[in-house]
């Protein structure tokens, strides 16, 4: 007999695991389907750590969600007993009137986020990890830090299961369709029906939902040892983003246990999630090396690297909300390289849409309907 659920969530990465946890916690009978294992390395949620920050240069409309995200990460820590978020403070580095520094300042001032403007000289004196040129400035915010990816996903899944949710791994959804009675889902292991479907497929959203202008982009992250250099450890070095001349963005995370992480954001090649090039090549290394030689001269050669995938929209805002063709299908994706920090609150948004048909936040700017009418793959 075909099993029926109130909600089926497809994908158990950052967004799907949180959606599953939040739906189950509200008493919604929930099935989460994941084609690979928990914390696999083929999507967007791997590479040990992700930056959390609130003075959001991208768009001040994200800030109310980020304020709640911090609370809900802390609530998940208390519930699960796991340490998820290490506060380090955050530096946004660039020209004072550039996209990054001016945007972060705008969000901080608009939403009363504690911050301090710093000159290049002040940054160089206070933080031994950096060497900034005179023309640069920085915004420092306290409420920034590093999330441990694997611990976050494990906490969502174990707390979701405890709340009654069913999480099934190594089970791929092969087809979905809506009918008068609800949603029908076929997988590699069976068929299910549900009242609603939540699509959290990360890079595979390009294949799960038609009609959305999504593009996958290959990214590479690098790790460097911090031994013997206290300035690279938590307590001495904040997480950072740096907008370089010409518009390239780099970011980094201090050593929270497995080395300092540094990477370029965007500027990567388009990729198909099923056939992405996972080999790290000389070009990838050269880009990060040249940044390090300019700004982080205390770092030695890298000791590890990993490829990962962004799922981008043209405006680099997420896609979150009801499918344009059918409100029983919710789309949560295309985080364009900055979504992980929101996972805790996005699960709440999904649960609100399922149980109250509206969100507590203004998510109109993330609506799938802002693009041409969607269809299904
Ligand atoms: C290198 C890199 C650095 C980043 N840095 C930051 C950062 O510092 N701060 C930040 O906030 N964000 C950051 N991000 C972005 C953030 O990591 C992503 O936005 C987030 O992880 C996306 O989560 P997701 O659940 O949408 O996708 P994923 O985690 O990829 O999850 C999608 C899941 O769906 C599954 N799936 C797909 N199709 C099916 C199917 N048919 N059936 C079953 N399962 C399916 C996949 O296997 C996958 O597990 C970064 C991303 C990358 C790649």
Image (tube, rainbow, N blue to C red):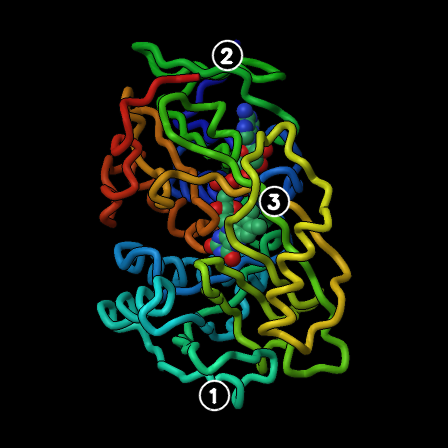
Picture coordinates of residue 355, whole percent (x, y) = 29, 36
Marks 2 and 1, how far apart at CA:
66 Å
Name the residue located 50 percent from the left edge and 79 percent from the top edge.
133
Question: Ligand 1: does it lie within 8 Å of the C-beta at label 3?
Answer: yes
Front-most of 130 and 211?
130
Residue 121, label in figure = 1
Name the residue tied to disc 3.
308
Mark 1 packing: few (<14 Cα in 10 Å), some, or many (20+)? some
Q: Is residue 364 above or below residue 194?
A: below
Judge left or right: residue 66 versus residue 86: left
Q: Nearer the viewer, mark 2 or mark 3?
A: 3
* Chain-order first, disc 3 or disc 1: 1
* Chain-order first, disc 2 or disc 3: 2
Front-most of 333 and 248?
248
Judge left or right: residue 58 versus residue 2: left
Judge left or right: residue 173 versus residue 345: right
Front-most of 83 and 110?
110
Q: Is residue 260 above or below residue 334?
A: below
Q: Nearer the viewer, mark 3 or mark 1?
A: 1
Name the residue tied to disc 2.
2
Residues under numbered marks 3 and 1 in contact, where contact means CB atoms less than 8 Å apart: no
Q: Secondary structure at mark 1?
A: helix
Q: Secondary structure at mark 2?
A: loop
């Amino acid at each position: 007999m075909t099993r029926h659920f109130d909600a089926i969530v497809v994908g158990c990465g950052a967004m799907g695991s949180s959606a599953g946890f939040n739906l189950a916690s509200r008493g919604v009978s929930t099935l989460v389907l994941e084609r690979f294992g928990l914390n696999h390395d083929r999507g967007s949620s791997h590479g040990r750590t992700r930056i959390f920050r609130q003075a959001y240069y991208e768009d001040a409309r994200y800030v109310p969600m980020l304020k709640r995200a911090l609370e809900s990460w802390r609530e998940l820590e208390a519930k699960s007993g796991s340490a998820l978020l290490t506060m380090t403070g955050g530096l946004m580095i660039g020209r004072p009137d550039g996209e990054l520094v001016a945007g972060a300042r705008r969000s901080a001032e608009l939403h009363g986020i504690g911050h301090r403007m710093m000159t290049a000289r002040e940054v160089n004196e206070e933080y031994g990890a950096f060497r900034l040129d005179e023309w640069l400035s920085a915004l420092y915010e306290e409420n920034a830090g590093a999330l441990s990816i694997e611990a976050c996903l494990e906490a969502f899944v174990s707390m979701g299961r405890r709340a009654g949710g069913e999480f099934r791994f190594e089970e791929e959804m092969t087809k979905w369709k809506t009918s008068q009675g609800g949603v029908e889902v076929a997988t590699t292991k069976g068929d299910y029906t549900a009242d609603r479907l939540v699509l959290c497929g990360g890079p595979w959203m390009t294949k799960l939902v038609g009609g959305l202008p999504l593009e996958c982009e290959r990214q590479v992250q690098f790790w460097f040892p911090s031994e013997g250099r206290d300035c690279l450890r938590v307590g001495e070095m904040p997480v950072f983003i740096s907008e370089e001349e010409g518009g390239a963005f780099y970011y980094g995370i201090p050593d929270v246990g497995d080395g300092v992480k540094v990477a370029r954001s965007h500027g990567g090649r388009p990729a198909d999630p099923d056939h992405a090039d996972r080999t790290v090549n000389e070009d990838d290394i050269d880009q990060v090396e040249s940044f390090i030689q300019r700004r982080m001269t205390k770092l030695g050669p890298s000791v590890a690297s990993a490829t990962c995938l962004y799922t981008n929209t043209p405006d680099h805002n997420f896609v979150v909300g009801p499918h344009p063709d059918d409100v029983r299908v919710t789309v949560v994706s295309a985080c364009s390289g900055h979504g992980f920090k929101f996972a805790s609150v996005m699960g709440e948004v999904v649960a609100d849409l399922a149980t109250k048909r509206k969100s507590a936040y203004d998510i109109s700017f993330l609506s799938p309907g802002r693009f041409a009418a969607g269809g299904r793959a």
